[in-house]
Each structure stands twice: as structure tokens, then as C-alpha cells.
Amino acid sequence: MDRNTQEVPLRQRILSPLAAGFELVTGRWWLLLLPVALDLFLWLGPRLNIAPLWQQLIALLPEATVPAETLAQLMEAASATNLFALLSLPYLGVPVLMSGVFAPPLTPLETTSWPIEGDLATFGIGILLLGGGVLLAVAYHYLIVRALAPEAGGLRRLPQLTARLFGLVGFVTIALLIIYIPLTLFAGLVGLLSPAFSMIVLTMGIALMLWYLLFLGFSVHGIVLAGLPVFTAIRLSISLIQRQMLPALWLLLIVFGGRFLLGWVWHAVDLGNWLTLVSIVGHAFVVTGLMTGTYIFYGRALGAAAQESGIVKRSRAA
């Protein structure tokens, strides 16, 4: 893989698949329908807030431990939450501009807020919404692959893709918890000695988790495009990034950074009027183009690896 690509400039190896991704999305506008529809729902649709649960938790606190202003801010934040945002999973799920559990405060239409009472109800609804997010992710990635390679996007693959994406989400979640729980315990112990060292430990732990997620960045591509099992797709993603470290990491950073930058700019200029529709459509186009570019990059990397393998086999036979 390296030998086939080392003569191609790094900039071209990154920009070429991205340009091809935007070109494909331009000709297949229907790829934008799902992210635009979900964004509109999160923007103008009903909202699930957890204010009652926060009230129960705050009532358990001693009155003298938390200032009244802080309690008021916590309640205001709880009232602004929208658990429907769990329908968009980070990176894997349908990309939306209205990401995050805090709903936009300004909208051109009045929205309805549905409070959730009880921790068990909140947990159960959250799990159901995360499951719905995986199903939406299956549809989103399936449509991209169908546009790229119609022969690889048969409807009979959908049950298998769904099961494998659920498996990928479960594996990533468990692995992150295995890192996060000991990390927080260790940071708490270190914090007894020095709060500064505790922050250093937490920062290093977060950097470790982000690095871990980057190496798994092409796992969903292996499942949806190549039809690989979960652990095979994970191993191939790690191998691909190890072999093409610079272009692969730069590509993933452009995708993550692009999504973050678009969200940050929108939150900075949002006025809560109908012009937000332009931002929603523009965000769907840019992020879907970037995501399609990662699939093109992955497909080319697989092709280069297969060609390299064929060269090695022929040389051994000779």
C-alpha cells in the first residue's frame, strides 16, 4: 500500500477523495434528505427534557453546599436539554447541525417540551433513542455506499449491516468505559494530592481516548462498504491508519474539524430565524461530502492493498 502511494503527493491523496466526494453528492442531492430531515426535527420538533430528574437530584443536595445562582443555572440548563439529540451519534450517526443535548433556545416557531420523570424512564428512553440513532446511521451510510457502488448496496445486506453496526457501537462504548472509569478513579486519587496533577491525568486520558477513536475511524467503512465483520473491520482500520498514517489521520481530522467548525460558526451567528434553513442544508452538503470522501479514500486504500498483495503473490510464484 505504501509503495503504491508514496509517489503521489500527500495533498493529492487527501484532497482527491474529498473532491470526488463533493462531486458525487452534488449529483445525488437525495443523500442530503436524511440529515436535513433529522436537523429539522431537532430544530422545530418536540423536545425531551430532564428537568424533573434534575429537580430530584438537586433536592438531595444540602442547601448550604450549592449557591442558589448555581442551582438556577443547572435548572435552566436541564430545561434546555433535548434527549432526541441522541438520534445523531458522534461521527457514526447522521450528521446534524443541531448536535448536542442542549436544544437551540431561539426558533421561528414555538416548540413543545415533554419532561421526563424518573431516572429509570430517562435511562430507558435514552437507550431506545441510541438504538434509533444506530438505525438512522445504517440508512445514512447505506445510501452513501449505494451511491458509490450500487452492486455493494443490496437491500438484503441491511439486517447484517444493522447487527454489525450495533456490535461496533457496543464494542466502542465498552472500550471507552474500560478506559474512562479507571482514569476517573485514578484522577480522583491524584486530586487528593494535587488538583493540577489531576487535570493533567484527565487531559492525557482524553487525548488517549481521542487517539483510540481515530484509529477506529474507518471501522464503519469496512462494515458498510467491504461487508466485513466487526473485529475484522476494526483490525483493518487500525492497519490502514498505520500504513497511511499522514493522509488517513489528516482526512479524519478534516472531517471532525469541519463538523466542529460548522457547528461553532452556526452557534455564533444563529438568530433563530428561517435563515437557519440555509445553514442546515449547507451543513448537510458539506459533511456528507466529507463523509463520502472518506469512503472513496477507504475504497482506494483497499484497492491499493489488493494490488500490492497481488504483486507479492505473483513475485513469490515466479
Image: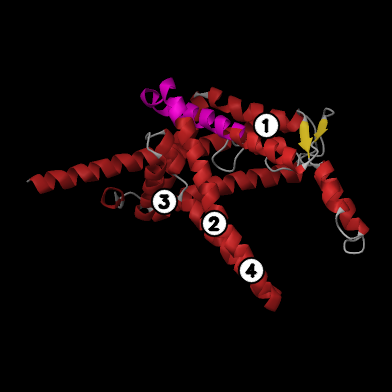
Residue 305, picture quadrant: top left
Q: Secondary structure at mark 1?
A: helix
Q: Is residue 138 magenta?
A: yes
Tell me which segment is drawn in magenta. 132-160
Label annotation for residue 39:
1
Label annotation for residue 187:
4
Q: Give me the C-alpha separation between circle 1 and circle 4.
A: 37 Å
153 over 194 or under it: above or below: above
Relative horizontal placement of residue 289, taking residue 246 as reference (left or right): right
Residue 31, picture quadrant: top right
Q: Give me the C-alpha separation between circle 4 and circle 3.
A: 34 Å
Relative horizontal placement of residue 57, taking residue 188 as reference (left or right): right
Which-is-in-front pick, marks 1 and 4? Answer: 4
User: According to the image, label 3 marks what residue?
Assistant: 247
Disc on the earlier residue, 3 or 1: 1
Which-is-in-front pick, marks 4 and 2? Answer: 2
Disc on the earlier residue, 1 or 2: 1
Residue 297, percent from left and from top? 40, 41
User: According to the image, label 2 marks what residue?
Assistant: 178
Q: Give me the C-alpha separation between circle 1 and circle 2.
A: 32 Å
Three-letter code, disc 4: Ala
Residue 270, percent from left and from top? 76, 40
